[in-house]
Image (cartoon, grey):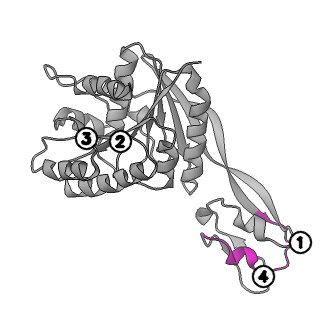
Amino acid sequence: MRKTIIIGVTGGKGGTGKSTVAVNLAMRYAKMGKKVLLVDSDVESPVEHLLLSIERRKVAEMLAFRPKIRQDKCVKCNLCVDNCPEHALMGLPGRIPELHEELCSGCKACFYVCPVSAIEEYFASMGNIYEMEVNGLNILQGELKPGFKQYVNATLETIQRALSMKGDFDIMIIDTAPGTGANIYVALAQCDIVIAVTEPTPLGANDLSMLLELTKKIKKPAYIVLNKATMPGGKRKLIYDVAEKFAVPVIAEIPYDKDIMSKYFKGEFSKTTTKGRKDVFYDIAWKILTLLQ
């Protein structure tokens, strides 16, 4: 069985370019002859299949708990209503509670507190897991269906499926959702190294700070990639101030490239850097391998 290196690519906010970095790194490693699995764990807004313009293949269905109240057993005590953290169950005294499915997180608190076992387990399809292949690169992607709130559970299922496959790959790259919530922790918990992608803006610096607080708490080695480093009006110093505060180095700067940006917003993907320009993604890929030695 292979020893698989797991690299987390994340960003404190959306739009920093983390998916572009994750896909480029995965492609560079594949070109090096490595067996690579790219995991798109942004279950609320997966984009890898769009960036690479490839068809995806459904391989599994993700299920979510939904309470089913037995009217013949319910005693109308409203304990389930009182203990629902999402206020998805609503009811008046003397009436059987009603479920508002769009609010339910599937936590099962109602199932456990019901004193007469009037709540049965029912499972609805909350999303799917897909697999894809392109140019020697394998991709695994989770996607949550609209109206479901179980993004943490969906992320966990996606990561667990990826981990069950890791013995087949040299490198696994996990592209996370933006933010610093529980779904980000789930995605980064298994990583050997975290690449924090940010941009030279006050918001980028603020969210980078929160992200590095998280990596510090979970004791994961982190490194910063500054994307859009040459953007007009950029505040590079803000990013380097955060890097100094957390003693986390900036290992690369990706210049602002209108070609890459325009293709990204059109749902296309720039597979190579601008002609004549140094391949910064290739350099980042090698640097990460060096840091892991």
Name the N-terminal-most of marks 3 and 4. Answer: 4
Q: Are marks 4 and 1 in contact (CB under 8 Å)?
A: no
Tag shown at residue 222? 2
Q: Residue placed farthest to the bottom in the image?
A: 93
Q: Are marks 3 and 4 in contact (CB under 8 Å)?
A: no
What secondary structure is found at the residue carrying circle 1? loop
What secondary structure is found at the residue carrying circle 2? strand
Tag shown at residue 95? 4
Distance between the alpha carbons at the discs numbered 2 and 4: 53 Å
Query: Taking 47 as reference, is 32 above or below it?
Result: above
Q: Nearer the viewer, mark 1 or mark 3?
A: 3
Distance between the alpha carbons at the discs numbered 3 and 2: 8 Å
- Residue 47 is drawn in which quadrant? top left
- Determine whether, in the image, residue 11 is placed left or right of residue 173: left
Q: Which residue is mark 3?
A: 249
Q: Nearer the viewer, mark 3 or mark 4?
A: 3
Distance between the alpha carbons at the discs numbered 2 and 1: 53 Å
